[in-house]
Image (cartoon, rainbow, N blue to C red):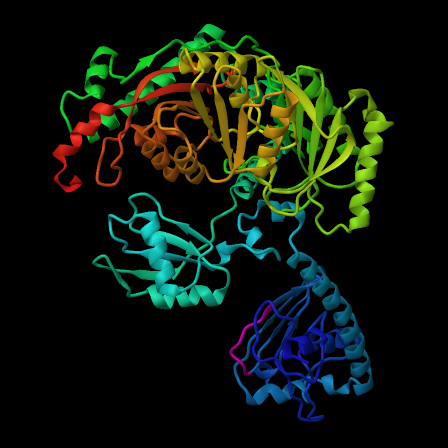
Amino acid sequence: MAEGEDMAKGDPTKEPASLSSDQNTFPIFETKKSEQEVSSSIPGFPPLFQFAKLQTEASSWTANASDNSAIPTYEFEEKQPMIQTELSTTKEVSWEENSVTINLSATNGADSSILGESSGLGSVSNMQEKEMVEAEDNEMDKEEEKVGEEATANDEPDEEEAESDPYFYTKRDEFTSEIYKIELQNLPKKCGYKQFKKMIANRLNVRPVKVKLPPGASHAYVTFRNEEERRLAIRSLSGHKWKGKVLSAKTAQPLPDPLALQRAEGMARKRMIQDAARANVDAKRIKLDGDEVDELAISVRLNHVVTPLWDQPYSKQMETKKSNMVEILGKLTRKLKAIMVLKNNWVEEESAKRNGICCELLDCVESPVLDGYRNKCEFTIAEGPDRAKTVGFRLGSYKEGYSGVVEPSECIHISDKAKVISKAFQTYVRQSPLPVYDLCFHTGYWQTLTVRSSMYGETMAVLQFSPQKMTKDEIEAEKNRICEYFKSGEGKDVKLTSLYLQINHTRAVGGNAEAPFVHIMGEEHIYEELCGLKFRISPDSFFQVNTKATEKLFNLLKDWCGDHLDETVVLDICCGTGALGLCLAQSVKRVIGVEIIENAVEDAKANAQLNGVTNAQFVCGKAEDIIVDVFKNMPRKTKIIGIMDPPRAGLHQSVLHAIRKSRRMDKLIYVSCNPSAAFVNFLDLCRPTSKRIKTAPFRLVKAVPVDLFPHTKHCELLLLFERDMTSVDAAKFYKWYY
């Protein structure tokens, strides 16, 4: 048993190593008569006071001593007895328990024997002393066991403390690379992310988990999988010379959890308000009034988050969106001017005519439907402002420190049908004993709800569920309960057409989770009508969220393709479920769709068959590879028009290079749902011929914003690019080209 454990159990045979004011330990006292050592670990009172107490009860005792200066003096008060004793030690002990204070001081070491002989304390029987010591020992054991239990309980943080600790996530059993992070300093000024990552890989032969290189900074952060890899990185990178700089490496602290930081600030503010309310009666009333105001304004706050332009007239919304597009195109024009080689190029000519932008910008195309237009809604399942399970939208982001969810009942861009379905799921989740998923601790079960609807009145719901450690039988039982709820229970009134459960074993939440879909109830697909065609919708199908506005977009795109398209082939890059290509198929000779997602290609083929379209072909694979194969097998005189509606971030550079190498593609129509994110794509398409890109570029002819997202700041931007053959002549100005 360890020394600390012996002391905790009150073992009188153990001698304390040191004496402090916060320990129940006291020096050992010797008596000449018995020559026995009395342990100092007796609780309640020290040994001297025990003897003095017995002496006080025997009132007949009177101390006679020849040298009063050497005899201990005792002073007792009725409420707070005090003993002052002069001993040989220079230590001073101040000890309080049960309203008793003892001060020990001494002058002569040899006179300690008087305590045993001259004071008369030796008359107390050893038996009585032993019984009292044993009784006090037992009492101390109970007290220290109780204190130990309380200390053990205090070692485990309660739920409130864990949620407010910004570093608590590093103490959990789950893996996080933030524990094994290093900071590299003295990096060269011109250091690219790819170069930096390659240097680390070559130097360590270990693949890091995360690499963070702040732009323009002379330091970077790298995380690893274990402590061994981190130590290896510090040893290998410290002193390493790279690009004329000697690097230094050291351990780095993990990043604080932003949500926990916000919770900690909120708890501190809550305590401050509570303290003020206790001190001031009026403060309580003010606090209640403030809560009522927040509760009334929470729907307004949510609208400002999800639809920031909701309180503006629609005409002003159109002006705002067009001005945003002018800003983006102006930035593109300035970038192109900086990289153009020849003077008096098309960028300078067009920008001089069009107020600083390099193309014609048409007025924003308005959406025919302003309210309840979304046919796909992704709701989050989490705690609401009242801590209840809620299905809705987040009022803030995790990075901002608040991830609470508010019901979408007042959101004007959500259809009434989607609101009813989300409310029904909220009722089921609240009845369920399973908690909602927690982004901070990665615990809980209910994650997201996706609701899809169509012009035919059909609805599909996809419930994302984290099974944690549930068995297959438990998952199956929960699936049956959900099915029963919407078949014959309270949820039957919503009349779902299709119901899926997405069992997500990963930490990714929402659309980022690549988890399988399990069909629970109803039809496997729903159907949507667009431009007179019928399209099959699967749980993970991409389809524009505003069907009526999409019809306007497709009709405009068809007009831009031009007339006399009987001999024209349309190459639909990132075709998805084939909606755009199939809408053009009846006007062109042939449509070739390219998509890397296999399930989307299967839906596109099914849609072509559903509508009797025979001149459309859909291929699964990388666009850069398929584009090359298509042009190899195509007759030379065939006219080819490229159309593409890529993801928000745009296309990879390899795809753009393949497009530029396809000389017979004279026209390219780009549909961008996030022009700011796809800005580099526009720049690369128009970039002049160079050592890296030797093919003829495109020039931007015109652009038009199409409002698919009323009441928000977003809109689709339709851009028309045409091949700039005059730039090929610029090759003679590049000596290295030949």
Region of the chain picked out in magenta, as a range: 88-94
Q: Residue furthest right?
A: 488
Camera-side residue: 240 or 111?
240
Residue 408 drawn above or below residue 14: above
Percent position (x, y) of residue 437?
66, 41
Query: Is residue 384 found inside the magenta-colored segment of the image?
Result: no
Percent position (x, y) of residue 598?
58, 38
Q: Residue at x 24, y 24 (%)?
A: 725
Can residue 60 be seen at all in this image of the molecule? Answer: no
Q: Is residue 4 left or right of residue 357?
A: right
Q: Residue at x 23, y 31 (%)?
A: 688
Query: Is residue 92 found inside the magenta-colored segment of the image?
Result: yes
Residue 21 drawn above or below residue 687: below
Percent position (x, y) of residue 339?
21, 31
| Quadrant in the rendering for residue 627 | top left
Residue 126 drawn above or below residue 277: below
Camera-side residue: 291 or 182?
182
| Quadrant in the rendering for residue 617 | top right
The quarter of the picture where the N terminus appears is bottom right
Residue 606 drawn above or below residue 43: above
The quarter of the picture where the C terminus appears is top left
Can residue 645 be seen at all in this image of the molecule? Answer: yes
Q: Is residue 38 left or right of residue 440?
A: right
